[in-house]
């Protein structure tokens, strides 16, 4: 179902009246994790003003260490809903367990399946039974074919609203957190009709590299970007070193707007 031959013209995923795919570029911005009402509302207003189309923010966080901040969980979802009410921005947030599907379906506009769960096939099947659009991130050690097969798992259950996200893969290089696989964008577009976006924040792990990688992503044909933005990166509970400030995000949006039409 994900095969390009089925839809040579490419597919568009619609979320709350906004389109991603086929020349419609979507910008998803927000903090790695929701930390407080003040934090998420303030960032949501800022990224909306700068032209983001969607608000991101983790409520359930897949942390490497069980002792790291795990997210505000259900309370985080509620704060995202408040932020949507304030700004009108649809919300994108990660689902880690099928047992949370009910509350996600009730509150969330796009369910993110993170890199660490890209091959959690039971979770993929469950989100596939939903009608809520899914943002599927590439596993950090997954091939392009495996990535598309995971999308197929979701689509095979009936949910064809899938957006793919390249977020960097593991290589021998350790200057950056991961290595952004820019070639994945044209490759996936050749193989599949699904929209593909790029997350330069998790790919680089370095705030200063977000802008050049964003430009590159748009240049190779990405249908959108997911950018981590924090109002106080130095004190962020998660991924501060790769988070840009609202002001830097405004500048990034100016740059991107010169390369493509952002809706
Ligand atoms: C995220 O987007 O918050 C995240 C955890 O990303 P990834 O799954 O790509 O590591
Ligand atoms: Mn993060």
Image (cartoon, grey):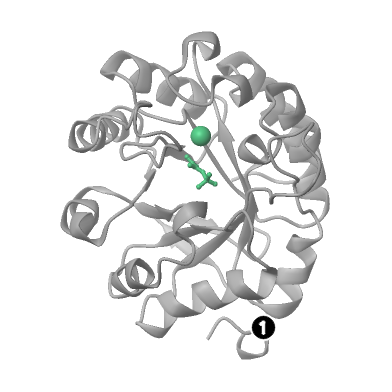
Q: Residue at x 20, y 34 (%)?
A: 78
What is the secondary structure assignment of the residue under circle 1? helix
Residue 16 seen: no
Q: Position of residue 57 (x, y in %)?
A: 40, 35
Please give the residue where the numbered disc 1 appears in the rendered image: 4
Q: Residue at x 50, y 41 (%)?
A: 53
Q: Closer to the camera, 68 or 146?
A: 68
Q: Position of residue 116 (x, y in %)?
A: 48, 53
Q: Which residue occupies the extreme bottom position in the image? A: 6
- Taking 16 as reference, is 202 above or below it? above
Q: Residue at x 34, y 75 (%)?
A: 125
Left or right: 43, with 184 as reference point: left
Q: Residue at x 31, y 14 (%)?
A: 38
- Taking 58 as reference, is 161 above or below it? below
Quadrant of the rendering where the C terminus is positioned? top right
Left or right: 165, with 83 as reference point: right
Residue 37 seen: yes
Q: Closer to the camera, 145 or 12?
A: 145
The image quadrant of residue 174 is: top right
The image quadrant of residue 56 is: top left
The image quadrant of residue 216 is: top right
Q: Residues within 10 Å of mark 1 (few under 14, many from 20)?
A: some
Q: Closer to the camera, 60 or 200?
A: 60
Q: Closer to the camera, 114 or 170?
A: 170
């Amino acid at each position: 179902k994900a095969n390009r031959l089925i839809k040579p013209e490419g597919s568009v995923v619609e979320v709350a009246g906004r389109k991603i795919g086929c020349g419609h570029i979507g910008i998803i911005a927000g903090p790695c994790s929701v930390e407080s009402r003040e934090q998420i509302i303030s960032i949501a207003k800022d990224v909306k003003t700068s032209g983001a189309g969607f608000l991101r923010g983790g409520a359930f966080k897949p942390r490497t260490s069980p002792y790291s901040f795990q997210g505000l969980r259900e309370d985080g979802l509620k704060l995202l809903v408040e932020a949507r009410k304030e700004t009108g921005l649809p919300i994108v947030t990660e689902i880690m367990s099928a047992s949370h599907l009910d509350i996600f379906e009730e509150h969330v506009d796009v369910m993110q399946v993170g890199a660490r769960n890209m091959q959690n096939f039971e979770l993929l099947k469950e989100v596939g039974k939903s009608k809520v659009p899914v943002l599927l991130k590439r596993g950090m050690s997954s091939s392009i074919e495996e990535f598309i097969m995971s999308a197929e798992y979701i689509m095979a259950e009936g949910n064809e609203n899938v957006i793919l996200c390249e977020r960097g893969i593991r290589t021998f290089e350790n200057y950056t957190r991961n290595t952004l696989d820019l070639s994945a964008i044209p490759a996936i577009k050749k193989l599949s009709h699904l929209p593909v976006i790029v997350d330069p924040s998790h790919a680089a792990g370095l705030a200063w590299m977000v802008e050049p990688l964003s430009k590159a992503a748009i240049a190779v044909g990405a249908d959108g970007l997911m950018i981590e933005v924090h109002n106080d990166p130095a004190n962020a509970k998660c991924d501060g070193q790769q988070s840009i400030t609202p002001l830097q995000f405004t500048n990034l949006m100016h740059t991107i707007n010169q390369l493509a039409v952002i809706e």
